[in-house]
Image: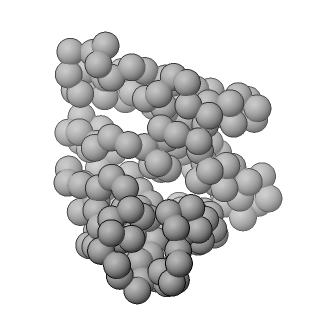
Amino acid sequence: MNKIAVFASGSGSNFQAILDAVEEGLLQADIQLLVCDKPGAKVIERARDHHIPIFTFVPNSFESKAHFEKEIVNELKRYHVEFIVLAGYMRLIGEVLLRDFEGRIVNIHPSYLPAFPGKDAIGQALQANVSETGVTVHFVDSGMDTGPIIEQVKIPVLPGDTRETLQERIQKAEHRLYPAIINKLLQKDIIGGIVQ
């Protein structure tokens, strides 16, 4: 069974979708660790409820990103983690994690990349008045949502959509797509971000 860690910063709806897929046997993985950079985030309760070990940290209490990423790598090694899943983790991954887990970190982003990278992709889409946006699963590199794309789905932006209504449809799509794609990736050899 593949040992994974999930990184999250907020409520953890994608974390919950991954957890549900594992429990239903749709995702062949063992969640070894939740990594969270916000000690008060709701995702921590979700992990606790399912007895998943948690590593929380306060980034600005460290000298640099490299320092807190070294701590994270130590925890990942302690739990023998093989693969990292970002699920609403609101930080760029730095060189320490990239070096140790090259080609083994994936992210889900609420837009049809390369459109609307970075923070508030849903707000960006509404502001741009586009007719469609989407969801993208991609490998992580040192850029902001710039890694190789694995899978995408388009989501229409409907007349009268608010941030809440569009976010709800995007999250439904994320919760279906992400566990399925993670499962596919874990069933194959992943080398340097390329599915062999």
Q: Foreground: 153 or 78?
A: 153
**Which residue lies at the image location 51% right of the left edge and 22% below the top edge?**
39
**Which residue lies at the image location 20% right of the left edge and 50% below the top edge?**
142
Q: Foreground: 136 or 66?
A: 136
Q: Foreground: 19 or 132?
A: 132
The total number of labels drawn is: 0
Q: Position of residue 69 (x, y in %)?
A: 31, 28
User: Quadrant location of residue 190?
Assistant: bottom left
78 to 46, vertically: above or below: above
Is any part of residue 40 visible from this angle?
yes
Q: Position of residue 10 (x, y in %)?
A: 52, 40
173 to 40, vertically: above or below: below
Q: Position of residue 35 (x, y in %)?
A: 49, 32
Please identify the quadrant where the C terminus is shown: bottom left
Q: Position of residue 33 (x, y in %)?
A: 56, 34
Is any part of residue 137 visible from this angle?
no
158 to 185, vertically: above or below: below
**Which residue lies at the image location 59% right of the left edge and 68% below the top edge?**
165
By what rule are the colours in the image chosen? one colour
Q: Give left or right: position of 61 versus 24.
A: left
User: Furthest residue to the front?
Assistant: 160
Q: Give left or right: position of 120 versus 167.
A: left
